[in-house]
Image (cartoon, coloured by chain):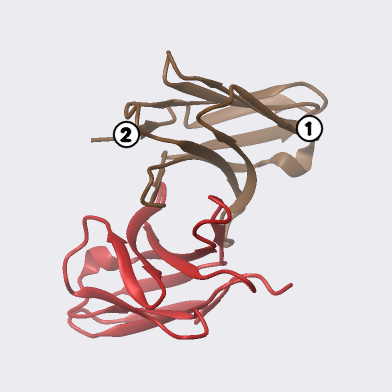
Chain colours: A red, B brown
Amino acid sequence: ETGVTQSPTHLIKTRGQQVTLRCSSQSGHNTVSWYQQALGQGPQFIFQYYREEENGRGNFPPRFSGLQFPNYSSELNVNALELDDSALYLCASSSIGISDTQYFGPGTRLTVL
Amino acid sequence: DQQVKQNSPSLSVQEGRISILNCDYTNSMFDYFLWYKKYPAEGPTFLISISSIKDKNEDGRFTVFLNKSAKHLSLHIVPSQPGDSAVYFCAAKLDTDKLIFGTGTRLQVFP
């Protein structure tokens, strides 16, 4: 059984640029959630995708957007990057209706200069 | 507004003794609670969970206790091992499947 994978591992961007992060969900899971973890904080919920539709959103501006594909993989896009967007971005997969547990990938470390 | 709180940023325990990590929450609508362990440069690893209809769940060395009247849960690790040294996050779920995390407790287990 393949776990949750994320790419790239690290990324450096400059303020104002756009970035795309990718996530492959665990085999058998139909839901992907994205979280942002700033230094010294717990992960903060960005949004969740289920059946290719957004299924809930946290307190993040519209420049944070996402996609889910038919194979349940997902992308997180961030436009007009700001310095405060520097964080670890975590993807978690789960199966709505089967289990309440979310399983996390290793994360993508984004640095905005 | 911090709905899930871990008030102890760090905890140091001797190998073989019990580690007790605490978590408080404010929203009585939370229906599921989870504990995750996180090593540096890795994603959180799921440890153990508990439904709001139970008050205890056990899995090997790990036991989670839930006190709904006090809005408090705790994770007990017995016996503690050096490999348990990590940051532990408590998380709570609403029916939307969104997880709300605490700020974490860094556990150090020394020989």
Q: Left of B58 or right of it: where is B16?
A: right
Q: Secondary structure at mark 1?
A: loop
What residue sits 56% from the left and 37% below the top?
B106
**Residue at image mark 1:** B61
Q: Which residue is mark 2?
A: B3
Residues packed near mark 1 inside 10 Å, few (<14), some (14 to 19) or many (20 plus)? few
Estimate the spatial distance between the alpha carbons at disc 1 and disc 2, rounded to whole Å: 28 Å
Q: Position of residue B84 (x, y in %)?
A: 72, 40
Q: Quadrant of the C terminus of chain A?
A: bottom left
Image quadrant where residue A68 sits: bottom left
Same chain for mark 1 and mark 2? The answer is yes
Q: Chain of mark 2?
A: B
> Of B8 and A44, which appears nearest the observer?
A44
In the rendered image, residue A3, in percent from the top left (x then y), is placed at 66, 70
* As drawn, B92 above or below B15: below
Residue type at mark 2?
Gln
Q: Is residue A37 left or right of residue B60?
A: left
The residue sitting at 35% across, 27% down in the picture is: B28
- Specify the label residue B2 is tagged with: none
Q: What's the residue type where badge 1 is placed? A: Arg
Question: How many numbered marks are there?
Answer: 2
Give the x, y percent position of residue A8. Answer: 49, 82
Question: What is the x, y in percent for residue B27?
Answer: 32, 30
Q: Earlier in the sequence, mark 1 or mark 2?
A: 2
